[in-house]
């Protein structure tokens, strides 16, 4: 059988850039967005039903 190895191991692939979905998967960011969203929802419901 013919040896086709080059002697050195191939370089590891470069790390892929992380995008928006990676950022949204972080728990602190999701908690912050949930709090802001709930405050906006409460303000909208207050404006709709109580004013």
Image: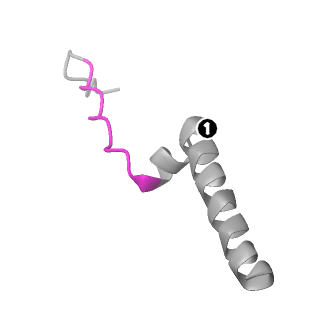
Query: At 33% from the left edge and 42% from the top edge, which residue is drawn?
Result: 16
Query: Is the C terminus in the top left, top right, bottom left or bottom right quadrant?
Result: bottom right
Return the residue nearer the eye: 34 or 43. Answer: 43
Q: Would you identify the image quadrant in which residue 48 lies?
A: bottom right
For the stretch drawn in magenta, what is the main secondary structure?
A: loop
Tell whether 27 sits left or right of 4.
right
Tell whether 33 sits left or right of 21.
right
* Kind of element beneath mark 1: helix
Return the residue nearer the eye: 33 or 38. Answer: 38
Q: Is residue 12 inside the magenta stretch?
A: yes
Tell whether 44 sits left or right of 11.
right
Return the residue nearer the eye: 22 or 1. Answer: 22
Which residue ends up furthest to the top in the rendered image?
Answer: 7
Point out residue 18 in the picture as x, y percentages from the top left corner. Answer: 37, 45
- On screen, residue 9 above or below 15: above
Colouring scheme, one of rainbow, by chain, secondary structure, one colour: one colour
Q: Is residue 21 inside the magenta stretch?
A: no
Crowd tier of the residue under label 1, counting other residues whose Cα lies within 10 Å: few below 14, some 14–19, many 20 or above: few
Query: At 21% from the left edge and 16% from the top edge, which residue is drawn?
Result: 8
Query: Is the N terminus in the top left, top right, bottom left or bottom right quadrant?
Result: top left
Q: How many marks?
A: 1
Q: Would you identify the image quadrant in which residue 32 lies?
A: top right
Query: At 31% from the left edge and 44% from the top edge, which residue is drawn?
Result: 17
Per the rendered image, the range of residues in magenta is 9-20
Which residue matches tag 1?
27
Which residue ends up furthest to the right in the rendered image?
Answer: 49
Return the residue nearer the eye: 12 or 33. Answer: 33
């Amino acid at each position: 059988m013919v040896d086709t190895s080059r002697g050195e191991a191939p370089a590891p692939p470069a790390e892929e850039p992380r995008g928006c979905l990676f950022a949204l998967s972080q728990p602190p960011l999701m908690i912050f967005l949930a709090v802001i969203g709930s405050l906006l929802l409460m303000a909208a419901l207050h404006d709709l039903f109580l004013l």
